[in-house]
């Protein structure tokens, strides 16, 4: 009896077999056979082949994904935070975007100029008092349904746009790059608010981040050569809303998010498609972070008379 007829599977020694893996030439039984372009392969060679195949990449070089997980997480987080602030309104006072303001002994913010008469000590709060986190946390807060002209409409408008555009932009950029763009757009909106608005003005909302996503949507579709008529209409709607909203919302936050999101999207989409791409993209992101940080520090220094709290 020759050796071919007595060969056994390398994974199941008790099973006699007559087929070899076309890659490693080990004998494999029917349970271990995996169909290949030519013949059959063993499970290990199939796994090795799958690892060697280059993973599909997005236009920005990110990992391709069929599910916009980051968009879903951001959407859910905004809704959950909104429910939390409805139950505990004090969350807004603590984490909303405020440059600098005085708080009375009873915890009430003091507004206006002139002499302040108080029966107790006053305290300051805001970014100028070292509460830097407000510049990001404010992007996850929205106007209470019990206050202001918008109420729950404020959250609804932002979430509708995030749902419609965020899912598309995330799949075009990849999860990590989309998350960076969203957060930096939110930060850009807060920085412009800090620089251009009354320090005591309170602002909340994901609008800055959403405007950044809208700008990225335009840039990425332009990079791909998509139907610019439809994409341009979206940009015009965003710009129109930017102008109209100046009468009742923080247009500074909208504009800041639009500029930062657009700039970062350009860096992501037009970076050279070679080994320099990641370096160029990371460098652009770092440059934006430095620019925003320096701008915020300079403004805080003006508000505090030269000191910058950490």
Image: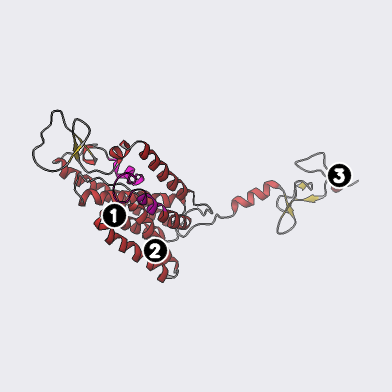
The answer to which of marks 2 and 3 sits earlier in the sequence is 3
Residue for point 42% across, 62% down: 220
Residue with the most extreme left position: 115
* CA gap, disc 2 and disc 3: 66 Å
- Magenta segment includes 25: no
Residue 153 included in the magenta stretch of the image: yes
14 displayed left or right of 264: right
Image position of 179 with respect to 89: above or below: below
Residue linked to disc 3: 6
Question: Does dot 2 land on a helix, a strand or a loop?
Answer: helix
User: Disc 2 marks which residue?
Assistant: 218
* Label 2, residues with CA under 10 Å away: few <14, some 14-19, many ≥20: many
Q: Would you say 127 lies left or right of 8 here? A: left
Q: Is residue 82 left or right of residue 302?
A: right
Residue 111 image-quadrant placement: top left
Q: Quadrant of residue 55?
A: bottom right
Which one is in front, 239 or 288? 239
Q: Earlier in the sequence, mark 3 or mark 1?
A: 3
Tag 2–tag 3 contact (CB < 8 Å): no
- Magenta-colored span: 132-159
């Amino acid at each position: 009896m020759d050796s071919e007829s007595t060969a056994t599977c390398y994974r199941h020694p008790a099973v006699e077999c007559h087929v070899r893996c076309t890659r490693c030439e080990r004998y494999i039984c029917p349970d271990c056979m995996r169909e290949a372009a030519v013949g059959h392969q063993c499970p290990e060679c199939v796994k090795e082949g799958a690892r060697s195949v280059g993973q599909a990449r997005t236009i920005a070089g990110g990992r391709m994904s069929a599910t916009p997980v980051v968009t879903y997480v951001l959407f859910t987080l905004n809704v959950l935070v909104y429910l939390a602030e409805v139950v505990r309104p004090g969350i807004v006072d603590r984490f909303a975007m405020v440059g600098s303001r005085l708080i009375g002994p009873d915890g009430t913010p003091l507004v206006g100029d002139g002499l302040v008469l108080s029966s107790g000590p006053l305290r300051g709060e805001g970014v100028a008092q070292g509460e830097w986190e407000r510049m990001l946390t404010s992007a996850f807060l929205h106007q209470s349904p019990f206050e202001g002209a918008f109420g729950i409409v404020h959250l609804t408008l932002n979430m509708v746009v995030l749902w419609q555009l965020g899912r598309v932009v995330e799949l075009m950029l990849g999860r990590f790059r989309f998350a960076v763009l969203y957060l930096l757009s939110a930060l850009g909106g807060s920085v412009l608010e800090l620089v251009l608005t009354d320090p005591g003005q309170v602002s909340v909302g994901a609008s800055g981040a959403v405007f950044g996503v809208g700008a990225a949507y335009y840039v990425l579709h332009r990079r791909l050569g998509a139907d610019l008529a439809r994409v341009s209409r979206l940009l015009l709607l965003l710009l129109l809303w930017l102008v109209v909203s100046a009468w009742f919302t923080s247009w500074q936050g909208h504009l800041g998010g639009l500029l930062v999101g657009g700039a970062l999207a350009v860096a992501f989409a037009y970076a050279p498609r070679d080994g320099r791409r990641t370096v160029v993209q990371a460098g652009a992101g770092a440059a934006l972070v430095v620019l925003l940080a320096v701008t915020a520090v300079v403004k805080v220094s003006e508000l505090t008379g030269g000191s910058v709290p950490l």
